[in-house]
Each structure stands twice: as structure tokens, then as C-alpha cells.
Amino acid sequence: MKDVITSSRIGLISGKGKFPIILAQEAKRRGMKVVAIALKEETNAELENYVDKIYWISIGEMQKGLDILVKEELKEVFMVGKIEKSLLFKNIPRDGMISNLIKFAADKLDNTLLKAVSNKLAELDIELLDSTILIRPLIPQKGILTERKPTQAEMDDINFGQRIAKSIAALYIGQTVIVKDKAVLAVESIEGTDQTIKRAGMYCKKGIVMVKVSWPDQDMRLDVPTIGPDTIKLLKEANASAIAIEAQKTIILDIEESVNIANRAGICMVAF
């Protein structure tokens, strides 16, 4: 996997959330031109303020998106931001290309579908870049990130949750589990991390522990585990006591703000 960018103009295929905006800002800071393909169903409209050109398409218009990349003569692209998998089951019109991609995919797992998209890009001589190249400071190394260290009970839950999370990730079910006293309260599936936290909060009103891991064969071009201030705020609302993430394989958006929120809430944050 290439670790450098050779183009002065890059493409940005954007899902939801702040990650696409942060990446665009960093690319611009380094003097690059950014051409974005934004998804009407997902992308934050604020992205328009941070790119040189933006095209809005539906998530079902894959051929149109590829045609734009070819027309713009883009050879290196990022694909970042969450795309809700539940959209697969909604009545959104699809063009022939994406219909066939879904129809003939071996399964509907995230990595399977995303790799099929990356293969389509490769057929057009367009390289999908490691999504972390420009934002390495947002990927923590191993250690305790907050002022408060975990208690022994929290470490026991983190170690327990890590084993469970790696097991469900190995089955490509999800990357997050919420535990308390070595009991599993919620397992992430198609609903995503935020809803998993909310669901766990229904069962336990204090002291839950969230553990998030990478896929077994994590491709850093695709669907890298990501948390941010909104994640920590939800954990605060759920009266969580700790969050553990996988070091060197997890992005923390607005890392300083995320840690500050955790500190104020008394939530311990650990990268294992």
C-alpha cells in the first residue's frame, strides 16, 4: 500500500461525519487541490467550504461518480466517512453498475462491498489511498489518553471486551461491544456505534465500558475504526466510565477535544 501522495489534485469520495472535512482541510493545508464527490444521503453540506470543487450524487449513482473521477483526470482518491449500511435496504434508485456490484457480491459485508468499489477504481487506473496518510497524529499509540487511569474493574472489563470485540470482528458483525462487570450489554451490528451506545445505556445506567477494535485484516483504505467528540458525548450521556480503542488502527477525530470531554466527564480512555 502506497504511503505517499504523488498528485497535486486528489479526489475525495465522502460519506457522513467530520472525517471528510478534516481530511480536506489537511490536504488544502498542504497545498493540494481537492475534488469531492459527495453523497446526497450522507455527506455533511459543510464540506463544500473546504474543497475546490464538489459534485453531489446519490449513493445509487456509482457510474456517475466514476465518470466524474475520469473526467476530472484524478488518479489518487480517498474514500472516507461513514456510509450507513442500512441504505442497502431502503428504496433508493440504483444504476446498473451498483445493482450488479451488490447482486454478484459474495456477501453484503462492509469489506466485501468496499473492496468491490476499490476494484472498480483500479480498473480505471485510479488508486485508492490509505485514508490515514494525512492525519497520522489522530491515530493514538498504545497508552492511557486521559488524566484518569482505569480501575482494576475497568481493566477487567476492557480485557474481557477486547476478546469479545475481536471475536465479533472476526465474523464481520461489527467492531464495538459495550460491557459491564464482564457481561455483554450491546454488540454493534448494522446500526453503528452511536446506536449501540444508546442501546447499552438502556440496560445499565452507570459504569459501562466501550471497546472498539479493527477488522482482522484491516485495510486502512477502507472503513477505519473512528471515534470523536460525538462518541464521547454519547458515552457521557450513558454514564460510561471507560472507552478502549485499538492503538495505531483507530482514528480519533478532534483528538484534543475528545480527550478534554472525556476528562471533564471522568471517562477513562485507553488505547490497547
Image (cartoon, helix red, strand yellow):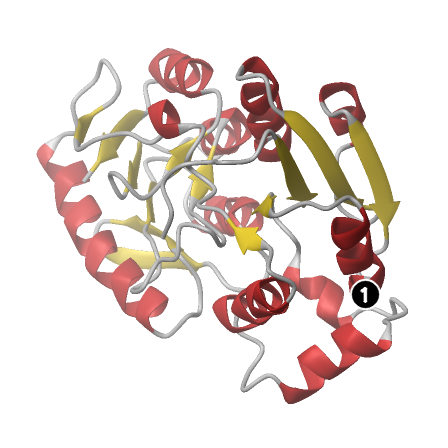
Locate the C terminus and report the quarter of the image it occupies.
top left
- Does 98 appear above or below 138? below
Front position in the image: 197 or 59: 59
Which element type, helix, strand or loop, lies under badge 1?
A: helix
Q: What amino acid is found at the position of numbered circle 1 in the picture?
A: Gln
Residue at position x 58%, y 77% in the image: 108
Q: Could you tell whether 16 is left or right of 147 in the image?
A: right
Residue 101: x %, y % from top left: 68, 78
For residue 249, which quarter of the picture?
A: top left
Name the residue beneath numbered marker 1: 63
* Residue 175 at least partly seen: yes
Question: Where residue 135 sits in the image (x, y, percent)?
Answer: 43, 28
* Residue 175 appears left or right of 100: left
Q: Is the residue marked by circle 1 packed among few (<14), some (14-19), or many (20+) residues within 10 Å?
A: some
Instruction: Report the residue at 68% width, 79% height from top.
Output: 102
In the foreground, 85 or 60: 60
The spot of residue 169 in percent (x, y) is 35, 65
- Could you tell me which residue is drawn at 53 percent across and 52 percent down? 128
Residue at (85% x, 55% y) in the render: 58
